[in-house]
Image (spheres, grey):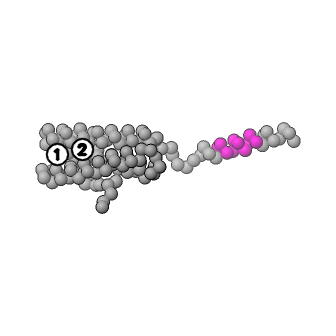
C-alpha cells in the first residue's frame, strides 16, 4: 500500500500539469513589449508627419495617419486588457488621448490642404 501512494500522487501531478499546459488561450506579449510596439508606431507617425511638413507629399500624411491610428488602437486594446489596476494604465491612456488629438489634427490638415486620406478610422478614440 505504501508503494502505491507515490505512484498515485505523481500520476495526479502529471495529469494536472498536462491539463494546465493545454490552455486554450495563446500566450500574449507582455504589457511592456506591447507598449514599446505602440510607441514605435507613434514615433513613426511623427516622423512621417514631419516629412509631410517639409515636402507636402500626400503619402506622408497618409502614412502618418495610418501609423498613429494603429498606435491608438494598440493602446486602447492594451487598456481594455490590463484594466485600471495596472500601474501604467494612465500613462497608456495619456498616450492614447494624445494620439487621438493628433489624428484630429491630421484630419483638419488633410481637409485644409485637400489631401485624400485612405482611412479616417478613429477606433480607440472615445467620442464625447
Q: Residue furthest right?
A: 1
Q: Is residue 6 magenta?
A: no
- Per the image, label 2 sits on a secondary structure element best described as helix
Per the image, the residue denoted by label 1 is 58
**Farthest bottom residue in view:** 128
Span shown in magenta:
9-18
Specify the label residue 64 is tagged with.
2
Q: CA distance from mark 2 to mark 1?
A: 10 Å
Q: Is residue 116 visible?
A: no
Along the horizontal axis of the image, is 128 left or right of 15? left
Residue 8: image x %, image y %?
78, 43
* Nearer the camera: disc 2 or disc 1: 2
Q: Is residue 56 left or right of residue 4?
A: left
Q: Residue at x 59, y 46 (%)?
A: 22
Q: Looking at the rendering, in which quadrant would you find the C terminus?
A: bottom left
Q: Residue 36 placed where, x, y %?
A: 38, 38
Amino acid at each position: 500500500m505504501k508503494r502505491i501512494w507515490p505512484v498515485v500522487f505523481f500520476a495526479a501531478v502529471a495529469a494536472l500539469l498536462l491539463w494546465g499546459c493545454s490552455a486554450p488561450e495563446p500566450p500574449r506579449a507582455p504589457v511592456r513589449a506591447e507598449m514599446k510596439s505602440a510607441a514605435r508606431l507613434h514615433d513613426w507617425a511623427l516622423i512621417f508627419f514631419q516629412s509631410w511638413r517639409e515636402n507636402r507629399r500626400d503619402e506622408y500624411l497618409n502614412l502618418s495617419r495610418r501609423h498613429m491610428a494603429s498606435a491608438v488602437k494598440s493602446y486602447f486594446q492594451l487598456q481594455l486588457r490590463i484594466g485600471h489596476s495596472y500601474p501604467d494604465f494612465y500613462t497608456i491612456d495619456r498616450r492614447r488621448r494624445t494620439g487621438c488629438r493628433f489624428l484630429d489634427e491630421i484630419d483638419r490638415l488633410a481637409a485644409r490642404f485637400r489631401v485624400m486620406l485612405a482611412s479616417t478610422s478613429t477606433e480607440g478614440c472615445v467620442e464625447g
